[in-house]
Amino acid sequence: MKHDRLTGKTALVTIIVLYFAVLAGCGTSSYSNSSNTTGGGSPPVTYAEYLYVGDNGGVIHAFGVDSSSGVLTLVGTYSVTNAAAASDVRLAADPGGMAVYATSAGTGGPNVVALTVNSASGALTAVAANQSLPVPAGKIAVDPKGKNAYVIPHPSANASEVFGFSIDPATHGLTALANQPIALPGIPNDVAVDSSGGFVYITFQGTAGHEIAGFSRDPNTGLLTTLGPPFANTNGDSPQGIRVTPNGDFAVVANQATSNVSVLSLTIGSGVLSNVAGSPFATDNSPGFVAIDSTSKFVFVSNTGGGSVSAYTIGPGGVLNPVAGTPISLGSISQPGSIAVDPLDKFVYISTIPSQVSGFTLNSSTGALTPISGSPFSIGVGTPPRDVIVVKP
C-alpha cells in the first residue's frame, strides 16, 4: 500500500509539471518579436520608463530604461501597419503614458494608429479604431489632456494641410474631426501643442522669416481656427522642429537653412508669438529637432548637418545660453534626428542614423550632458530610426 501511494503522488506531480509547461508555451504574443524576460526562468523585468523608437520600415522598437543608469534594454518590436503602408514612423505619447500614437509614411492601410502601453512590460497593443489618411502621414502631436491628436503629412506628400482627431478616453482610439483636413500656408515640417492646450503651432516651408502657422484650439471639440498671418521666425529659414516650453512662456524653433534657433514669447490668451531679444541663437550646422525639459530650464537641439547635439539654458526673457561642452559630437558617421528628454528629466536620447540611439545623463543644475555607459544603443541592422519618445506609464 505504501508503494501504491508513492506511485500516485509521482503521477500527480508529473501531471502538474506538464500542465504548467503547456501554459508557459502559450504565453507569448505574436505581435511582439521579443519578450521582456530575463534568463534562467526569472520573473519579467519591469521599468519605470520605456523608450520607443520608430524606424523607416513601419516598426516601433521598445526599450526599458534603467532608472539609475539610463541604459536601454530591448523589450519588444511592433509593426505599426501592414506592409503596404509601412514607412517612416513618427511618434507621440498620451500625457499619462497610457498610449503611444504612431504614424507611418505610406498608404494602402492604417497610417495613423493608437497603441496602448503595458506598464509592467512596455508591450504595445494596437487599438481597433485607427485611421487611413489619403496621403502619407508625418509628424504627430497630442494635446496636454490627451483629447486630440494632430497629424501633418509626410514631406513626400507635398500637401499643405493638417488633420485633427479626437481620442477616445477609454480605448484611446482615434476618430477624425469634422471638416478635415485644414489648409496650411505651406508644406509642414513639425507640429506642437502648447502646455495650456489652447494653441497649435506648425512650422512650414514658406517665405524666409515667416514660417510658423498658429491656430487656436477649441478645448471641447479640438477644432482649430487660424490665428491670422504666419508668425515671424525673424532671420531664420526652413524651420523644422518646434516645441513650446512646459511653462507656456516660449516657443523654440530650429531653423535648418540658417543654422540657428528662434525663441518666441507666447502671449497668454491670444497665442501670439513674438521674437525675443537676441533671437535667433546660433547652433551647429542644420539643426532639425528640439526638446525641452519639464522644468523649462533647458533646450536641446539635434544638429543634422553637424552630427551633434547642442544644449542651452533658458535665461531671463527667453535668451538661450550655450551649456559648456556643447555641441557634443555624436560620431563621424552619425546623423542625429529626433531628440527626447525622459519625463523624470534624468536622461536625453537622440536617434541617430544609421541605426542607433545615443543616450546622455542630464545634470539638472547645469544642463550638462554625459554619455551613458554603452551608448549608442543599436535598434537593429538596416533599420534607420526616425522618432524617439520616452514614456512613464
Image (tube, rainbow, N blue to C red):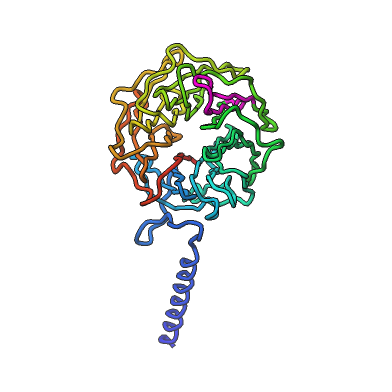
Say above or below: 354 vs 260.
below
Say above or below: 86 vs 237.
below
Q: Residue furthest bottom?
A: 1
Residue drawn at the location 44% of the way across and 44% of the way down: 53
Residue drawn at the location 45% of the way across and 53% of the way down: 77
Of residues 85 and 67, the one nearer the viewer is 85
Of residues 377 and 354, the one nearer the viewer is 354
Q: In this image, 77 relative to 138: left or right?
A: left
Image quadrant where one finds the N terminus: bottom left
Image quadrant where residue 103 sits = top right
Say above or below: 151 vs 21.
above
Q: Is residue 210 rendered magenta in the image? A: yes
Instruction: Please provide percent x and percent y for residue 185.
Output: 60, 27
Image quadrant where residue 152 sits = top right
Instruction: Please provide percent x and percent y for residue 257.
Output: 42, 26
Q: Is residue 254 rendered magenta in the image? A: no
Say above or below: 53 vs 263.
below
Instruction: Please provide percent x and percent y for residue 8.
Output: 46, 82
Q: Residue furthest top?
A: 277
Instruction: Please provide percent x and percent y for residue 290.
Output: 44, 29
Tell me which segment is drawn in magenta.
196-216
How many numbered circles does the render carry? 0
Image quadrant where residue 385 sits = top left
Of residues 49 and 355, the one nearer the viewer is 355
Residue drawn at the location 34% of the way across and 28% of the way down: 363
